[in-house]
Image: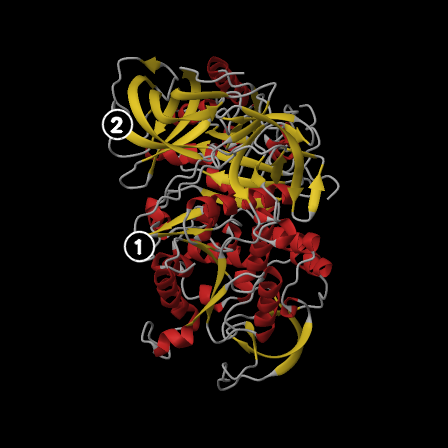
Amino acid sequence: MGTDLGLLRVATAGSVDDGKSTLIGRLLLDSKAIFEDQLEAVEATSKAKGHDHTDLALLTDGLRSEREQGITIDVAYRYFATPKRKFILADTPGHAQYTRNMVTGASTADLGLVLVDARHGLTEQSRRHTVLLSLLQVPHVALVVNKMDLVGYDQGVFETIEKDFRDFTDRLGVPEISAFPISALIGDNVVEPSEETPWFEGGSLLAHLETVASVRGREGGSAGARFPVQYVIRPQTGEHRDYRGYAGRVEGGTFEVGQEVVVLPSGMRSTIAGIDTLGQEHERATTSQSVVLRLAGDIDVSRGDLVADVEHPPAVTRELTATVCWMATGALHSRQKLLLKHTTRTVRAIVDGVNAKVDINTLDRDGSAEELGLNEIGTVSLRLSQPVVVDPYREQRVTGSFILIDPATGGTVGAGMIEGTHGLEYSI
Amino acid sequence: MPAAPPAALTHLDVLESESIHIIREVAAELERPVLMFSGGKDSIVMLRLAERAFAPARIPFGLLQVDTGFDFPEVLATRDRWVERLGIELHVASVEQAIADGIVVDDGKTSRNRLQIGTLLHAIEERGYTAAFGGGRRDEEKARAKERIYSHRDDFGQWDPKNQRPELWSLYNGRIHEGEHMRVFPLSNWTELDIWQYIAREELDIPEIYYSHRRRVFERDGMLLSESEHNPLRPGEEVTERQVRFRTVGDLTLTGCVDSDASTVKQIIDEISVARLTERGATRGDDRFSEAAMEDRKKEGYF
């Protein structure tokens, strides 16, 4: 495991017939992540359905109703590994009405794969998915031009699509783009570089996936050290009678023993007295480690509080502006009352107003909108019953994101990315 | 393309941390969780993760085992060692008892595995559990690959795959109404290989039947089953002694073993790294009934 680069989370995007499932099948097959009994089952089903080839898409379409309809309804998570890295692949549905599932898959992704059919070029759907990847600020985007075998591996076709894509993503402000000419069916440039594309020097898609930096590997955003408190550890045993620790996961930066910290929203300061995991004490804890922090002095800390470094504290606020993806059939409207879950804190929220609706084909904002319907995205102002401790989403994915819950049904009805705060209640 | 900076944490560190985060969220937000425990490798990994989540305090919930009456004695012995070491409460819901009480009906045709569903749902309701942790992994089965980490169950214990809550970032929604409960799968993103690598790293105590041993077995439907009083031979079936091990543990009438010389965790890792069959395809009779066997059982309330 000397070259273990950790986990890379990938979300796929693209239209229904762009060959997404075939690409995933190819990645799984060529990295030997498919077992014989799975392949046999898929071969048998393909035959029974009268197909003349093995339908690799059946590997990912696991539900009865998906097989009936021949489409992907819900996000499926697939796993494969190479000697260099482990991958979690969120296979998201292409259909427009499942935008919420696309957002679900992309919310945890380090890299978004946008698949395009070489014969058709960029479609409305590929643009829409790219907009969603840019809204969610997925750090890497890879354009995959598939079915190159059907256009004679024409360099011009690939370069035109790549240029269209770069023009589009430049306008969206997507930072890093890589592009690959492939044939998922034949396997060109998927796992091995293809001899059919001597003009292409970018290597294989898999080689790119193996080396790109993961979010977690980059110490969790540009904001400072962040530690939302999940649970207070107070053992009622003789051995640890006076022990009081705060369990949570480091969601950004690094904490060290002796470091001065601030507990928010109270604003009380302390220093880190110890960092513990089962049977071990540590000098430091870094992004994405689950640990228990002990703080010096006798201060009141509970679930929902956030421990941060004093140099770069987050904002404490009761008023938020956020980009919201609405996921319920009834519309989001002014004066609506919801629950907002942010890190480990759930508070009541009132919608102050819908400021603009985002056109998810262009990212243009329509300021005349008053509601958001199912699968629509817009900028919304929210007022909260209690303060939350936040960063803008562009600086910190964890402290910058929240979900909205319908208090009557308990269902998750919205996903939010914080743009800014008003009425700052506390700052250092 | 610049080379990626070396990541501070290995993939196992990241998976472990994510699972601990989930376990703590459930313990903090749901009133009465329980950990479903079969004694197999996944539930033992779950126990270690729960231990890590709350150390140096004790795990703030108990264990629930659904006993089919057809469990391997080695598995029950391992269970008892863990329960004693952790000082954790264990509740055993017995299928035999559920049959005797008329909660489920043994028609002689339905497997004990299927009778676990009613037994489990009764135990959850009777004991008022609001969340039940399971060791299920998405790589096990195609229906599980579609299931959320927090899986909402209605008043009937049913899973509705078409109406799942979207799961965004690591913000889990555990809100339930009276009578409903959550099934929570902290190992969703782990694979069989990850589990074994973790067992190796943590040096976990697991049932001996995972290691290669001599066993009296017979072949049925392409699987090697253990000779047992619960498993009467059918015409034409013949017992032989072979060097085998188990890849999963469950009801011994349905769980097959594989020919294997792997007698250490390291050898098991080497063996499954090149395995060409999934653990369920190789050894679980219960998933073979139809293409959607697992999905159908899950809809009814299977874990």
Q: Nearer the viewer, residue B221 or A50?
A: B221
Q: Is residue B241 above or below residue B211?
A: below
Residue named by callout 2: A336
Q: Position of residue A303 (x, y in %)?
A: 48, 37
Quarter of the picture holding the C terminus of chain A: top right
> Which disc number belongs to residue A67?
none
In the picture, measured across the screen, residue A218 lies left or right of residue B166, that is right
Give the residue displayed 33% in from the left and 75% down from the top. B105
Q: CA distance from mark 2 to mark 1?
A: 27 Å
Q: Position of residue A193 (x, y in %)?
A: 65, 33
Residue named by callout 1: B179
Give the residue displayed 30% in from the left and 19% down from the top. A354
Asked if badges 2 and 1 are on one and the same chain, I answer no
Chain of the residue displaying label 1: B
What amino acid type is highlighted by mark number 2?
Answer: Gln
Instruction: Bin the neighbour count of mark 2 within 10 Å (Cα to Cα): few under 14, some 14-19, many 20 and up.
Output: some
Q: Is residue B242 above or below residue A166?
A: below
In the picture, measured across the screen, residue A301 lies left or right of residue A216, that is left
Instruction: Bin the neighbour count of mark 1 within 10 Å (Cα to Cα): few under 14, some 14-19, many 20 and up.
Output: some
> Tag count in the figure?
2
